[in-house]
Image: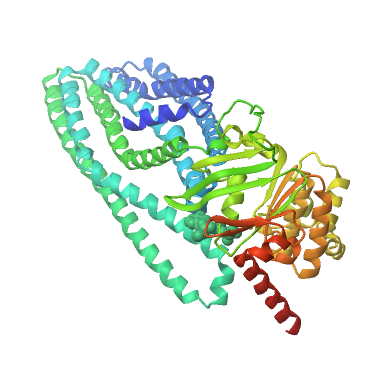
Amino acid sequence: MQSIKLFMRLTSYINVNWKLTSLAYLCTILALTLNLAQPFIFSYLIDEVLIAGHQEKLVFLLTLFGSFALGSVVLSIIRTGLFRYLGIRHMLDLRDVLLAHIRRIPLTEIEKHGVGKYSALLGWDTASMGNFLNHIVVEMVTQWFTMLFAISMIFYMDARLGWITVASIPVLLAIPRIFVKPMKKYADGVRSHNEEVGTYLYESIEGSKEIRAYGLEGWERKKNQSMYKDLVAVSTKETLFRMFSGQTGTLAFSFILIAVYSMGSKQVLAGTLSVGMLVAAVQYLNNALQPIQVMNNFFGEMQQSEVAMKRIEQFLESPVEQAAQQKNKAVSIPFPGESAEVSCKQVHVSYEGTQILRDIDITVRKGQVAAFVGPSGSGKSTLFKTLAGFMEAEAGDIRIRNLPMNQMSRSDLTAHMAILSQDSYLFSGTLYENIAIGRLDATEDEIKEAARLASLQSLLDTLPNGLQTVVDHQGFQLSGGQRQRFAIARALLKRPDILILDEPTSALDRETEEQVMVQIKQAMKGKTLLISTHRLDIIRNADIIYVMDQGTVLDCGTHEELVGRCRKYAALVAGQEQEELLEKIG
Ligand SMILES: Nc1ncnc2c1ncn2[C@@H]1O[C@H](COP(=O)(O)OP(=O)(O)O)[C@@H](O)[C@H]1O
Ligand SMILES: [Mg+2]
């Protein structure tokens, strides 16, 4: 009963409505009792009315029979409704819990596994656990109760028939045991293949552009086919195995029935058992042994749920990122030396064992614009992700507004900081809503102002619905530059004390880029701005420029200082000038 244990552990994560659950089970038991009493009434009908000829008892027995049937139906309807309601409630609850955990795990985990894993958890696994709660456990209780009730009735009628029934139980129980191991293997296989297909399907939609641009339809089809071939093979094997295990049980059951009939018939002929009782006993034998079969057939589903629940548990126990952990409100600690808005001392960052950033020292003071430049892959985005708490530093000291980062909770961090990553996401909804999430209590005027600051006015003027235009998932109707400007508007709306921009204008043309940068700098006057870019002209006036290369800070200073002494910086500038020249000629 590993599933039950697993399940009980998982119930600590969700709010199980025990009151309604108990009521649902009570209805189940009552309905079953009324149902199971029917063969007994029937046996009286045979013996008393049909054989002994007591006609006056017929109406009473039939009325009793009818009211039991009616009661059982009404109770069954109530219990089905209750379980349905509870099942959905519990599933939504679980989904909430999983989503909350997804918000707490390191972002790098999500990036590593992709959407497939998480949609499988929220979809397939959650549904599988819902099935366990709403269907499998209920069915188990039903079957066990039916079995015990029926066995008691058989013993009441004839002890020898009772013993045959009891003796056959272990045989029927033993049969599926043989199939446990391969069943589990196949269930696991089906699950992981489905996950793979899920990720793949998602990608094939997301990558539509690439697939068309490179004429990859054939490649896609081939990949598709090989993936489905595996899935079909493992699914078919799983189903065959499940059937095989079920049918072996059915066969065994037939042999037991033969034994009961032969012993029962002998007793009826000898006059030690009434005909009605034998008929009822065979009915009850069905009731007593059928559950084992039903439960065997449930074995596969149970294995599936067990796999699903194990994954859910494993996921819920996976470590959460530091910033998301429950921490006491951070207390301001005097900073040794100079005070700074953002500072790093000897910071090292690794990703899966590979060191990406090392010996990072930066100090950005309030009111400064700090720029980070360096070739692609030099670690700018990683540094920003670390400052935003998306990645953890393995060593070193990071302080944000004088507070050690490792003592700050996510809300401490987001209270003063906004970050614009390289690939900002637009949610499905209106453009207005997409800006508004920057600060949920912002007024309409503030939202319009943010759009204006991000140079979106002329675009909005061309849209018939302006800010109320609906964008679909990822804002596919917008160009990269337009999406980027909406992300900038969102970040500016927040009016953060510290704004971190990772290549915010990479998709903008030079003119718009200049406009936007002027507005950003204006809006952030007196506050702190960290910006990474490969467009050196927009950060020429930055208060401090950090030159990054291969995960370290090579040098820092103003543009003038760096041009004179930093070869890498000079090279970057020279490269840029050449690019500009080419652009002009072109
Ligand atoms: N998710 C990741 N998995 C593995 N390596 C990564 C990941 N993200 C970044 N890196 C590595 O970290 C280094 C720095 O990358 P990044 O911070 O994106 O640089 P930049 O923003 O300067 O282009 C690169 O060598 C890159 O290959
Ligand atoms: Mg980058």
In the foreground, 291 or 122:
122
List the single residue furthest toward the front. Answer: 565
In the foreground, 124 or 105:
105
Is residue 209 visible in the rendered structure shown here? yes
Q: Report the image quarter containing ligand 2.
A: bottom right
Q: In this view, does 264 lie to the left or right of 486?
A: left
Instruction: Say above or below: 76 vs 130.
Output: above
In the foreground, 546 or 67:
546
List the single residue furthest toward the bottom. Answer: 585
Instruction: Please provide percent x and percent y for residue 267.
Output: 13, 22
Q: In this view, does 526 lie to the left or right of 108?
A: right
Residue at (26, 22) in percent of width and height: 151
Locate residue 100: give its quadrant. Answer: top right
The quarter in which the C terminus is drawn is bottom right
Residue at (52, 78) in percent of width and height: 215
In the foreground, 176 or 31:
176
Locate residue 478: give its quadrant. Answer: bottom right
Instruction: Please provide percent x and percent y for residue 236.
Output: 32, 56
Instruction: Please provide percent x and percent y for residue 293.
Output: 28, 36
The quarter in which the N terminus is drawn is top left
Instruction: Say above or below: 457 vs 312.
Output: below
Instruction: Say above or below: 389 vs 41.
Output: below
Is residue 479 visible in the rendered structure shown here? no
Residue at (74, 84) in percent of width and height: 585
Q: In this view, does 339 lie to the left or right of 14?
A: right
Give the total of numbered labels. 0
Residue at (65, 55) in percent of width and height: 556
Instruction: Please provide percent x and percent y for residue 227.
Output: 39, 63
